[in-house]
Image (spheres, rainbow, N blue to C red):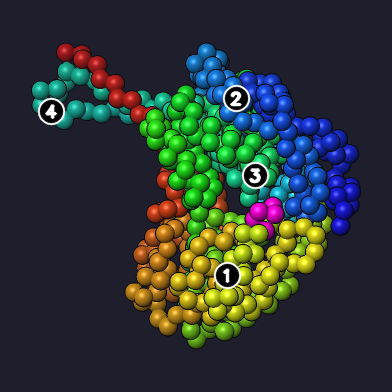
Amino acid sequence: MTLTTTIDRVPASLRDWLAKPRPMLIDGRWVQAKSGKVFEVQDPATEMLLARVAEGDAADIDAAVKAARKALEQGPWSRMSPSARGRIIHKIGDLILENLDELAQLESLDNGKPFGVARVADVPLSADMFHYMSGWATKIEGKYIPLSTLAASGQFVSYTRPEPVGVVGQIIPWNFPLLMAAWKLAPALATGCTVVLKVAEETPLSALRLGELLQEAGLPDGVVNIVPGFGETAGAALAAHPDVDKIAFTGSTEVGKLIVQAASRDLRKVSLELGGKSPNIILGDADIEDAIAGATAGIFFNHGQCCNAGSRLFVQEKIFDKVAAGIAANAEKIRLGVGMDPETQMGPLVSQVQHGRVSGYLKSGLEEGARALTGGAPLNAPGFFVKPTVLVDTHPDMKVVREEIFGPVLVATPFKEADDSLIAAANDTVYGLAAGVWSRDLAKAQQIANRIKAGTVWINCFHVFDSALPFGGYKQSGWGREMGQAVLSNYLETKAVTTRIG
């Protein structure tokens, strides 16, 4: 496979767009990095050059923060009515849908995911997030509060006033580049904040194209600034910048801890959507075929590069062999290939670094005694491909069981009864992002769901997302929630106002 055979599948207009060095968006202008540096974006399916992008660092972050501050305090954004702000946000969603194929092609080329998946999932869900949040722009309300002390009764009027937290630094990952940008930008805009968005160096392209659509929608200059660059430079500078009021980060728990340390110097507000090692529990009375299909999708969707992936499978002993064999058989049928090939069902991992990380976990698991029913190794081909893998004969102390792999690797474990020991095993992790339960007995499934320490629990389904559903984690899976009404609190301050009237 060559770069040409991948690129030839997209229109000439997109090929021309990729051929030009891609600048960053600061204060409404597309500019090169102050250092003049660019970095190369690689096609993970072919390991060939895809594009060159301006490499932002601390100087560019500082310029972007100043632009966001000016837009917040001096520009038209803060004076705009909520309904006018909502119309712009809704228009962004419309423009995403109008450019559906192009954005899906960018996601496929840049991230490696199948074009068909990006077209029916990533891009429409991104548009829906803007559409959904546009409605909240006019529904952010304070409330009247009657004072409780007798002396104050009737003498004062008190109310709360929600206000935008201010300039927000947002740092997003590479697994769902456009969707993560939407999850971050849409609620921040609905609350009236201004933003500096630092995009992942592996996958900056769809966010840069989104920046063009933001301008087309009529977003005022400086309200959203988009800076591609590396975490160690641009990301670190944004997290530590003294004029940023709040940091919102999605990524690994390890980097999340560094974000907190940097932000704590000025007690900057932080929300985090971090890693996971999610349990997926199949009881003996489950619909076995549904559970096998759901567990297969739960781990192998998006090449396993999902923070909420159902990577720890617990199956009741009496059906364990059948379920494990069924998932392994499904895994062997998954067709790996370049994302722009319509027959591809799973693309490559995003980068050589990620490929090495996942390969290292596979090697570790097998050396510690795990057995691969299928997969267990990288694919011997160009690109960063890893075979979908099902590991059995594992024990709780293995790295593959305890640590987030972020790849197409499932560890499967049998259990005897759905009792306290099962719940303890499911909760035996530093993470708490998501979980699944499969059973025909919905009362039993609900009881298990209520005891699992996770921000999302799916019953007889997996990977069900909606803009109205809050998403986030317990424990080391993060602080705060994405999506739904709950996300608005990430970007609002509450002011209490009291007036003496008597």
Closer to the camera: disc 2 or disc 4?
2
Q: Are marks 3 and 1 in contact (CB under 8 Å)?
A: no
User: Mark 4 falls on what kind of element?
Assistant: loop
Q: Amino acid at mark 1?
A: Ser
Q: Is residue 351 magenta?
A: yes
Q: CA distance from mark 2 to mark 3?
A: 24 Å
- Near mark 3 (Cα within 10 A), the count class, few <14, some 14-19 or many ≥20, is many
Q: Which residue is mark 2?
A: 59
Q: Amino acid at mark 3?
A: Pro
- Tell me which residue sits at (76%, 64%) in the image: 336
Q: CA distance from mark 3 to mark 1?
A: 30 Å
Q: Is residue 137 toward the left or the right of residue 383 in the image? A: left
Q: Which mark is residue 364?
A: 1
Q: Earlier in the sequence, mark 4 or mark 1?
A: 4
- Tell me which residue sits at (72%, 37%) in the image: 39
Q: Are marks 2 and 3 in contact (CB under 8 Å)?
A: no
Q: CA distance from mark 1 to mark 2?
A: 41 Å
Q: Which residue is mark 4?
A: 149
Q: CA distance from mark 4 to mark 3?
A: 52 Å
Q: Are marks 4 and 1 in contact (CB under 8 Å)?
A: no
Give whichever of 268, 443 is nearer the camera.
268
Give whichever of 32, 476 is nearer the camera.
32
487, above or below 425, in the image:
above
| Quarter the C terminus occupies | top left
- Is residue 488 visible from the viewing direction of this image? no
Closer to the camera: disc 4 or disc 3?
3
